[in-house]
Amino acid sequence: MIYNSFEDTGLSRVLKFLKAHDTEYLSGQDLSDVLHISRVAVWKHIKKIQALGYTVESKQKEGYKLTKKSDLLLPWEVISELGTKTFGQQAYYYDSVESTQNEALKIANKSNDEGIIVIAEKQTGGKGRSGRKWISPKGGIWFSIILHPKFDISNITLFPIASSLALSIAIEKTCKISTELKWPNDLTIKGKKLAGMLVDASFESNKIENLVLGVGINFKINSKEIEKVLKKTPNFYGVASLSEQKNKIESIKLIQSFLLELENIYEELNNNQTKKIISKWTERSSTIGKKIEVDTHQGKVKGEAVKIDEDGGLIVKDKEKNKKIFAGDIIHLTK
């Protein structure tokens, strides 16, 4: 099942009309007359709308009334009251897909539109960093965003850091929950992983042709069940879920807030305001100032995480020497 935010379908027209008249009952005949579709088509669309999680009451001789919106991240709900200029204004929704990242990469090769978002209720082959599988059951927030950056290619390693900062700010604003940022792009609660990010980029003539940001948020998932699956994997450090916090959370509000914060930070990157981004990220970091061990392609590096450099690299003080690391898995050491 695939939906998008820009096609004018019978379902979208019925739903829009029900929303516009949610204080009254609308007869099947009225809907048929106004929308120029048959009463049978109206009934079929109502059934699909209910299957998408909306509550539509029906009364004999009175008709239909929308009484509750869906909790799903449906494309028309995402763009409704969205405060961004471009990010998320075009949206695709899949009930199930192998990977939103794969779908977004296909779209990115065909479209130059900025900020297209691809959302899935669940992923069967979710992708994590370094080719790892990301477990993505129903209840999580799984999506990818397509961008065509103006910033210099040297800032691409800073982009995941900027994106994780945007998500941390959005969670704080909408959920009233504080998260910590673990280099390079993980969000944690009490040391356990809440969200992660993945970036795929295409280059042409030393410029970024397109960039696809994949985001996975453990929203309403069973963290203990996922921990059972992952506990024996390398560098595992636990799973956190937003639903296990005390605050009431709306997934639509969270994703809308993130898109706005990301758009703002993206503009800062385009204007080369890297110091501002790094400063804000450092304030929320669980990595800087800690004794760490980093597993890199060149081997393990152990030392103190000193700072994030202007290009997003992590500066680690190993004995008396500083080393810059751009990629690797971090373990926070207790001693």
Image: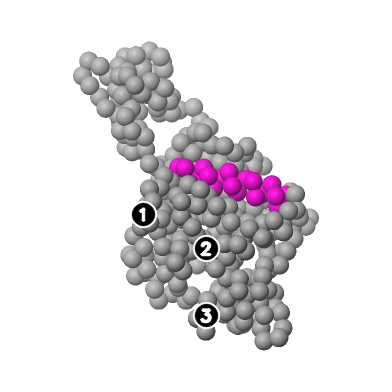
Point out the stretch of residues depicted in magenta: 252-270
> Is 323 colored magenta in this rendering?
no
Looking at numbered disc 2 in the image, what kind of residue is underneath it?
A: Glu
In this rendering, position of residue 328 left or right of residue 67 = right
Q: Is 263 within the magenta?
A: yes
Q: Which residue shows up at 58% across the image and 56% down it?
A: 165
**Of residues 43 and 60, the one drawn nearer to the viewer in this rendering:** 60
Q: Nearer the viewer, mark 3 or mark 1?
A: 1
Left or right of residue 3, residue 87 in this image: right
Q: What residue is rendered at 40% in x and 14% in y?
A: 34
Question: Is residue 105 in sight in this rendering?
Answer: no
Q: CA distance from mark 3 to mark 2?
A: 16 Å
State the image coordinates of residue 202 (x, y, percent, origin top left).
Answer: 67, 55
- Residue at 52 percent of width and 80 percent of height: 333
Give amino acid for label 3. Answer: Leu
- SS category of the residue bearing label 1: loop
- Which numbered disc flags the more N-terminal residue, 2 or 1? 2
Q: CA distance from mark 2 to mark 1?
A: 17 Å
Residue beneath disc 3: 333
Image coordinates of residue 142 in percent, x first then y, are 47, 52
Q: Secondary structure at mark 2?
A: strand
Q: Which callout, 3 or 1, points at the residue further toward the start of the chain?
A: 1
Which residue is label 2 attached to? 180
Residue at the extreme right of the image, as rendered: 205
Q: Residue at x 29, y 22 (%)?
A: 64
Query: Whole-percent x and y of residue 118?
Result: 52, 46
- Is 303 placed left or right of 12 in the picture? right
- The residues bearing labels 3 and 1 have C-alpha atoms spaced at a distance of 29 Å
Q: Residues within 10 Å of mark 3 (few under 14, many from 20)?
A: few
Q: Which residue is mark 1?
A: 246
**Is most of the magenta stretch helix, strand or loop?**
helix
